[in-house]
Image: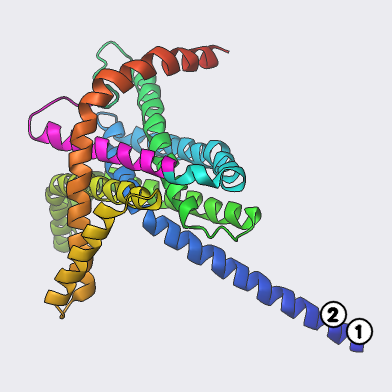
Amino acid sequence: MSGLLALLDDVASISKVAAASIDDVTGQAVKAGAKAAGAVIDDAAVTPKYVHGFDASREIPIVWKIARGSLFNKLVILLPVALLLSQFAPWAIPPLLMLGGAYLCYEGAEKVACALGHGDTHASEKHTHPETDGAALEEQRVAGAIKTDFILSAEIMTIALSTIPATDTIWMRALILIVVAVGITVAVYGFVALIVKADDVGVHLATRQNGLSSAVGRGIVKVMPGFMKVLTVVGTAAMIWVGGQIVLHGFAELGWSAPYDWIHHQAEAAAHAVPQAPGLVAWAVTAFFDGIFGLVLGMILIPIAHHIINPLLQATVAPLMARLRGA
C-alpha cells in the first residue's frame, strides 16, 4: 500500500512539473507573439490582396494553401535554423534582428512613399497577368504570398527567439517556438479568412428578409473597404515602429546606446508631465520616436535596396532558386 501511495505521489509531482512547464511555455509564447506584433499585423494586412480577383469559391482554398506554406516556412525551415543559432551562435541573433528590423523599416517606408505618390510598388505586389490562366495565376499568387510570408516569418521567429531566456533548454526553446509558429499562423490566416469572406457574408445577410440581418449585412458591406484601408495603415505604422525599435535596441546592445537612451529619457519626462497616465504616455512617446527613426531609416534604405541589394539578389539568389526548383 505504501508503494502505491509513493507512486501516486510521484505521479502527482510529475503532473505539477508538467503543468508548470506547459504554463511556462504558454506564457513565454504569448510574450514572444506580442513582441512580434509588427510583423504579425503586417502579415494579416498584406495577405488578403493575394485572393483579390478570384472567384469567391477559391478564396478560402487559396488562404489555406498560403497558411500551409507559412507553417512549412516556420516549422521545417526556420525552426531548425533558429534552434541552431540559439545553441551555437547566440551572438548572431541581435544582428539578425537588426537586419529584420531594417527590412520592416524599408517595407513600411516604401509603402508610405507609394501612398505619397513617389516610387512604385514591389514587383512582387503587382498581380496583373493577363496572359495567365486561372489555375496558373492562383499558383503564382500562392507562391508569391509564401515568399513574402517567409521573410515576415523569419522576423517573427527571430523576435520570438530573442525573448526566450538563454537558460532554457533547447527542447523548451523548441516547444515555445512551435507554439508561437502554430498560434500566430492560425491567428493570422484565420483572421485573413474572416476578412476575405466578410463581403460575402454581408451580401448574404443583406438579402435576408429579416430587417436586423439585412441591416447588419449592408453595414458589413459598407464598412469593409474602410476597414481594409485602416488595417493597411495600422500594418504599415506597426512595421515602421517595431522595425525602428528593434534596430535602436540592437544598437544599444552593440554598445551605441545614445539614441535609445535619449528616447527613453524623453518618454520618462513625458510620463512625469502627465501623471494621470504615465505608462500610456511613455509608450506613445517611445513609439513615436521609434517610428520617426524607422521611417527615416527606411527612406534611406529604399534607393540602396532598389539599386544595389535587389539587383544583387536577382543576379545570385534567383538563378539558385530556379536551379533548385528544376532539380
Q: Which residue lies furthest to the bottom in this view?
A: 2
In percent of width and height, residue 107 lies at 26, 36
Amino acid type of the residue that numbered disc 2 sits on in the rendered structure: Leu
9 lies above or below 140? below
Q: Is the magenta stretch mostly helix, strand or loop?
A: helix
Which residue is located at x 35 percent, y 52 percent? 252
Q: Residue 7 carries which label?
A: 2
39 or 125, nearer to the observer = 39
How far is mark 1 from mark 2, CA to CA?
6 Å
**x, y percent for residue 64:** 43, 39
Q: Find the magenta span and give its range.
A: 95-122
Of 327 and 109, nearer the camera is 109
Secondary element type, mark 2: helix
Please tell me whether residue 74 belongs to the stretch shown in magenta.
no
Position of the N terminus by quadrant: bottom right
Check disc 2: other Cα within 10 Å, few if <14, some if 14-19, many if 20+.
few
Question: From the viewer's perspective, is residue 73 above or below residue 130?
Answer: below
Is residue 274 placed above or below 234 in the rendered structure? below
Write down the quadrant of residue 138 in the picture.
Answer: top left
Name the spot of residue 322 as percent of width and height, x first.
Answer: 47, 13
> Can residue 100 be found in the magenta stretch?
yes
Name the residue located 15 percent from the left edge and 56 percent from the top edge.
Answer: 214
Instruction: List the residue tagged with mark 1.
Output: 3
Please say if the residues under marks 1 and 2 sit with CB atoms less than 8 Å apart. Answer: yes
Q: Quadrant of residue 57?
A: top left
Q: Nearer the viewer, residue 260 or 118?
A: 260
Kindly tell me whether residue 21 is visible in this rendering.
Answer: yes
Query: What's under tag 1, amino acid-wise?
Result: Gly
Give me the disc on residue 112: none
Front-lying residue, 90 or 127: 90
Q: Residue at x 13, y 55 (%)?
A: 219
